[in-house]
């Protein structure tokens, strides 16, 4: 919890700091971005974050590297380490890959999304966005910070690393998490992932209880043959203006992106006054500055919390 | 042929109903005489092995191993795999046909049995059920049997088509072989890498449901029931779920010839052992829930489980040092089966030693129809394991005889240390030499 509070407060401090001064924090340190999946927000914001602290970054993506020739994750990691990388930011399609890379390279590895497992910096930037709206001025985090807050996560929970990271993080701050979606995308056993998690199949009922609603994209690339009737899905789970106005007129609307307008939410909601989607993107840079700084500074001290 | 006397050991031969201190005389690959201590009539010139304080039992039989030859000698060879087997107290192993090429021919079966392979103990090939194990065209079981095959299986590639499985069961029954099914409805397990449950959800791994196993077992039992007339014999490989075991139990009550085996990792470990993506806990079928594990233990203790089989599945280090979902399935098991079975089934769960040994010798011999094996009655093959039943030791995979190291049991405490393994009268393993 201390580590979490520190990341949140450093994010704010770094965001407010003079950019030229900030550049000295990690001046000329080497950070590798290793991306096995396409990404716009995460990759760019990690890169801007590392550069904003003065680090040199290099991007290795699976489509323009020896990964295409069959190089293993272990060998790619060892190669980056030999090239002087002091930390690796990894986006990978296999769950557990960040753990594997850290084991094999003994470098700090920042998980920028591993398969269906976790996307920790997304949960942190989501938290920062929620706090700014629900708990303005509060930077620390403790087990009561989000007491009384209900966050509903809607849609393709099964394939979502964002959902997993959020459902594990938010209850630690006292929030209640409601998962909402059809059984094919939200198995019952999801509720057993941790404390403070409940399942509600009716979107309206979930919205009525929520201060925050987080919409997810259906991950077509991970459906693995699963058939989802999109028209039926929209009928039951799409967040549109009417639903929002009727059941959660004050709730904060979040989405980790990329959004598919007209599917999980309508353009009016995405662009509407309750939407904080672009604010989330902005918060991504601040949060990632804090975690990149933490990874490299802790590494200097010979260990991380 | 050399002659051997094993003197003063506790002979435990469950098939013969013997549990007493005996001297045993082995000659020309057979058991020639058994007598009380010092009472052997004929020992002329035989080498003497002093087995005082040790157990002398029929050599162990593993009816489910992957020796990787032909085709994947970098993982294991018949020579290295059988050396590992001998070190584990095994004198017979039945080798699954998912080699490269698949063992679906008389030629490959004979190649595996050729002396040039350097087997330390007996290898009994299991022939593929279908051409290339593709689940379509059935092989010539009579020819494969006369070449040396002892069972039929498309292990790793379950036979999904009802018609093909029915025909396989019927054709195997006609030549007196059992059909060993790897029960997995692969239509339900695409991309899955562990048991379906809260752990798989949390780890973000696709899960295999218990139903993907039990539905195939149930389907196969229906087919065996339809083939009641020909007495088809279905053997369920590496049974991993309570539901599949319940189906076997029910079929047995109805008089069907349905048998099953359980692997040590399935009666000892659960899905929790996947931990943080430990690829040494990745196998197929996967480690299941604690309730499944408990049902398997119960099934072993109450007798519905017919055999303990390791599913010894060697893989090179680099193949397991990868992302969990990309890692191959399986672990090695030949050098830990006896030590784990005695440590847990016998010591912890109080199963009589004779019954544990029977699951590892007499019963698999009967399932595979291996005549003169799995017992040390006079006239049987001189396949013997001699071990110290009280010795506790720590298993170190790096010191093993297998070419591969992929095991979750590295560093585990074992009970029962093999002293000698004797294959048809020859010492195949000696812990001291």
Image (cartoon, rainbow, N blue to C red):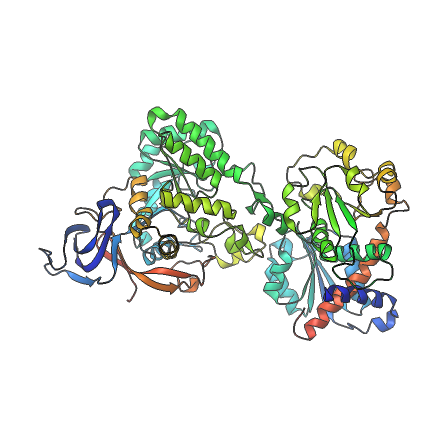
Rendered position, A240 above or below A73: above
User: In this image, A289 relative to B103: left or right?
Assistant: right
Q: Quadrant of residue B77?
A: bottom left
Total residue callouts: 0
Question: Quarter holding the C terminus of chain B?
Answer: bottom left
- Vertical relation: B414 (above or below) B158: below
| Position of residue B115 in the picture relative to residue A238 (left or right) | left
Q: Quadrant of residue A77?
A: bottom right
Q: Is residue B36 shown above or below A2?
A: above
Q: Which residue: 72% across, 32% down? A: A229
Farthest residue in the bottom direction?
A301
- The x and y percentages for residue A297 are 72, 72
Residue B95 shows in the view: no
Q: Residue furthest right?
A: A273
Where residue B112 appears, x then y in whole percent?
34, 47
Nearest to the observer: residue B361 or residue A24: B361
Q: Residue at x 9, y 56 (%)?
A: B42
Residue A146 % position (x, y): 78, 55
Q: Taking A118 as reference, is B380 left or right?
A: left
Q: Is residue A265 in sight in this rendering?
A: yes
Q: Position of residue A63 (x, y in %)?
A: 69, 53
Foreground residue, B258 or A48? Answer: B258
Q: Looking at the rendering, in which quadrant would you find the N terminus of chain B?
A: bottom left
């Amino acid at each position: 919890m201390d580590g979490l509070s520190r990341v949140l407060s450093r994010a704010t401090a770094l965001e407010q700091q003079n950019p030229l001064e900030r550049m000295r924090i990690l001046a000329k340190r080497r950070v590798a971005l290793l991306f096995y999946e396409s990404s716009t927000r995460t990759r760019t914001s990690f890169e801007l974050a590392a550069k904003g602290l003065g680090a040199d970054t290099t991007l290795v993506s699976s489509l323009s590297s020896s990964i295409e020739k069959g190089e293993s994750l272990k060998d790619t990691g060892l190669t980056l380490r030999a090239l002087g990388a002091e930390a690796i930011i990894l986006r990978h399609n296999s769950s557990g890959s960040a753990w594997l890379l850290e084991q094999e390279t003994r470098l700090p590895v920042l998980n920028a999304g591993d398969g269906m497992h976790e996307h920790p910096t997304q949960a942190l930037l989501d938290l920062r966005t929620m706090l700014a709206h629900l708990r303005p001025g509060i930077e620390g985090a403790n087990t009561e910070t989000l007491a009384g807050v209900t966050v509903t996560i809607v849609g393709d929970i099964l394939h979502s690393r964002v959902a997993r990271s959020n459902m594990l993080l938010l209850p630690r701050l006292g929030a209640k998490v409601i998962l909402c979606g059809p059984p094919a995308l939200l198995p019952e056993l999801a509720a057993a992932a941790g404390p403070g998690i409940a399942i509600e199949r009716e979107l309206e009922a979930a919205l009525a209880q929520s201060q925050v609603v987080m919409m997810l994209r259906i991950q077509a690339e991970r459906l693995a043959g699963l058939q989802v009737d999109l028209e039926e899905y929209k009928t039951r789970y799409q967040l549109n203006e009417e639903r929002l106005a009727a059941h959660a007129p004050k709730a904060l609307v979040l989405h980790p992106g990329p959004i598919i307008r007209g599917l999980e939410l309508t353009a009016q909601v995405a662009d509407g006054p309750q939407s904080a989607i672009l604010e989330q993107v902005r918060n991504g840079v601040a949060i990632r500055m804090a975690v990149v700084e933490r990874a490299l500074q802790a590494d200097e001290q010979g260990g991380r919390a | 042929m050399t002659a051997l006397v094993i003197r003063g050991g506790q002979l435990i031969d469950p098939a013969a109903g013997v549990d007493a201190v005996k001297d045993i005389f082995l000659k020309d690959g057979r058991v020639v005489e058994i007598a009380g201590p010092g009472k052997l009539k004929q020992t002329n010139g035989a080498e003497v092995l002093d087995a005082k304080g040790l157990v002398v039992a029929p050599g162990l039989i593993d009816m489910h191993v992957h020796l990787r030859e032909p085709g994947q000698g970098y993982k294991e060879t018949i020579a290295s795999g059988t050396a590992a087997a001998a070190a584990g107290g095994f004198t017979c192993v039945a080798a699954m046909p998912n080699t490269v090429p698949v063992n679906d021919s008389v030629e490959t079966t004979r190649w595996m049995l050729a002396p040039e392979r350097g087997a330390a103990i007996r290898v009994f090939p299991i022939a593929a059920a279908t051409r290339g194990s593709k689940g379509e065209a059935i092989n010539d079981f009579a020819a494969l049997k006369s070449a040396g095959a002892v069972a039929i299986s498309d292990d790793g590639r379950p036979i999904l088509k009802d018609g093909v499985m029915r025909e396989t069961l019927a054709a195997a029954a006609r030549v007196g072989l059992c059909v060993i099914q790897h029960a997995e409805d692969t239509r339900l397990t695409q991309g899955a890498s562990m048991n379906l449950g809260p752990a798989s959800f949390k780890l973000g791994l696709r899960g295999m449901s218990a139903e993907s196993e039990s539905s195939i077992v149930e389907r196969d039992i229906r087919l065996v029931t339809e083939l009641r007339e020909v007495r088809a014999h279905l053997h369920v490989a590496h049974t991993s779920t309570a539901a599949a075991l319940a189906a076997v139990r029910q079929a047995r009550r109805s008089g069907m010839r349905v048998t099953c085996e359980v692997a040590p990792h399935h009666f000892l470990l659960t899905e929790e052992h996947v931990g943080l993506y430990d690829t040494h806990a990745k196998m197929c079928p996967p480690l299941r829930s604690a309730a499944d594990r408990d049902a398997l233990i119960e099934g072993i203790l109450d007798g519905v489980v017919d055999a303990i089989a390791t599913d010894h599945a060697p893989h090179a280090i680099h193949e397991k040092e990868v992302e969990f979902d990309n890692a191959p399935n399986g672990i090695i098991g030949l050098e830990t089966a006896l030590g784990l079975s005695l440590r847990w089934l016998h010591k912890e769960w109080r199963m009589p030693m004779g019954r544990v040994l029977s699951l590892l010798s007499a019963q698999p011999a009967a399932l595979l129809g291996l005549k003169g094996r799995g017992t040390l009655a006079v006239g049987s093959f001189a396949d013997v394991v001699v071990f110290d039943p009280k010795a506790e030791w720590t298993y170190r995979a790096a010191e093993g005889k297998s070419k591969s190291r992929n095991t979750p049991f590295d560093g585990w405490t074992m009970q029962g240390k093999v002293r000698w393994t004797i294959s048809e009268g020859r010492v195949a393993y000696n812990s001291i030499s």
